[in-house]
């Protein structure tokens, strides 16, 4: 499911009420929603021009960490990465609140970049079960937001997803298989081979909101350039995971009330950290 925003929605940052209901509904029942072309080309170029040299230095110092020629990298909480439209776009915030309820917060501020020559990842969900003994599905409690910095197509390593219900498996079936481990309750990698999937093609500046439990994998980047996604994770107020990102006190004090609320569990009052530090 993808939604192209109207000029009024883009200008006001507010979804038509029926569109908001549809977007939240798709996240709940299908596992994700895609808003096409939300951020401007100019803003995306500014972010990409700042990201690329930092990523290159990170790879020089730390190397790849999520597969062949593929790396996850935390972002420094500074301009242009902490632009309000990136960290708390009002349309994104409205959908997340509709799904997770009030008081949600961010716990992850990072990026994912498959470089030329990257390979397939194993099919996985991004989380282990909350209650491994439960054989019932749980409501959404954690959502991932992705923003591509380049147009995503068949050639440059699009995200492949298994929507339509994989996020609604019993809780004991959830498993992050990137390390090669297998959940005895459900062999995700084997099961996915016989299931329908789709590759998520989208223009740069689009925004994807997906249930963290939905099965997915990175695909090979056969182009000549990197394919970077910005990535954030938002949780219900009661659920927390490790938050590594420091925010200087002066930066936090200058944020909007909503941004302060959403990023309240970051390391407030500490200097900006580069990803290799």
Image (cartoon, grey):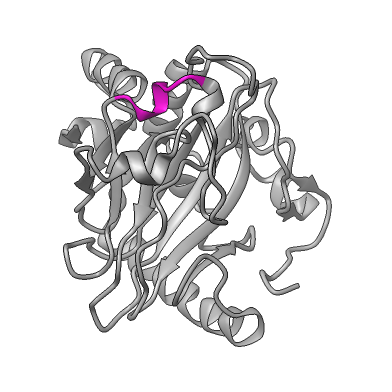
Q: Picture coordinates of residue 118 (x, y %)?
A: 37, 74
The part of the image, by quadrant, that contains residue 150 is: bottom left
Rendered residue at 45%/75% (across/down): 68
Rendered residue at 80%/62% (across/down): 271
Rendered residue at 76%/52% (across/down): 250
Screen quadrant of the C terminus = bottom right
Q: Is residue 2 above or below residue 172?
A: below
Residue 251 lies left or right of residue 221; in this view the side is right
Kindly give the residue lying farthest to the right in the view shown: 269
Residue 17 lies left or right of residue 61; in this view the side is left
Q: Is residue 149 above or below residue 49?
A: above
Rendered residue at 66%/69% (across/down): 275
Q: Nearer the viewer, residue 64 or 169?
A: 169
Kindly give the residue lying farthest to the front in the view shown: 184
Q: Picture coordinates of residue 133 (x, y %)?
A: 64, 18
Magenta residues (range): 165-170
Q: Nearer the viewer, residue 175 or 214?
A: 175
Q: Is residue 99 above or below residue 116?
A: above
Q: Is residue 141 visible?
A: no
Q: Nearer the viewer, residue 95 or 41?
A: 95
Q: Is residue 223 visible?
A: yes
Q: Picture coordinates of residue 160 (x, y %)?
A: 28, 50
Screen quadrant of the N terminus = top left
The part of the image, by quadrant, that contains residue 49 is: bottom left
- How many numbered markers are drawn? 0
Residue 141 lies left or right of residue 169; in this view the side is right
Residue 183 lies left or right of residue 132; in this view the side is left
Q: Nearer the viewer, residue 227 or 127?
A: 127
Q: Is residue 219 magenta?
A: no
């Amino acid at each position: 499911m993808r939604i192209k925003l109207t000029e009024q929605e883009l200008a006001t940052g507010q979804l038509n009420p029926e569109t908001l209901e549809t977007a939240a509904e798709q996240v709940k029942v299908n596992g994700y929603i895609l808003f096409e072309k939300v951020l401007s080309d100019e803003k995306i170029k500014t972010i990409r021009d700042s990201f690329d040299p930092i990523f290159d230095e990170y790879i020089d110092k730390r190397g790849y960490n999520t597969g062949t020629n593929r790396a996850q990298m935390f972002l420094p909480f500074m301009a242009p990465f902490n632009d309000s439209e990136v960290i708390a776009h009002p349309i994104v915030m409205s959908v997340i609140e509709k799904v997770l309820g009030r008081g949600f917060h961010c716990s992850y501020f990072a990026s994912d970049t498959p470089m030329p020559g990257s390979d397939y990842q194993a099919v996985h969900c991004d989380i282990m079960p909350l209650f491994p003994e439960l054989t019932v599905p749980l409501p959404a409690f954690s959502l991932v937001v992705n923003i591509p910095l380049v147009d995503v197509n068949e050639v440059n390593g699009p995200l492949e997803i298994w929507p339509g219900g994989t996020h609604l498996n019993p809780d004991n079936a959830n498993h992050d298989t990137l390390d090669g481990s297998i959940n005895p309750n459900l062999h995700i990698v084997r099961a996915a081979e016989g299931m329908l999937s789709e590759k998520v093609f989208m223009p740069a500046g689009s925004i994807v909101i997906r249930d963290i439990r939905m099965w997915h994998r990175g695909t090979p980047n056969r182009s000549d350039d990197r394919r970077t996604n910005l990535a954030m994770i938002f949780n219900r107020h009661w659920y927390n995971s490790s938050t590594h990102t420091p925010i200087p006190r002066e930066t936090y004090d200058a944020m909007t009330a909503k941004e302060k609320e959403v990023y309240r569990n970051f390391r407030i009052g500490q200097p900006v950290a580069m990803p290799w530090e």
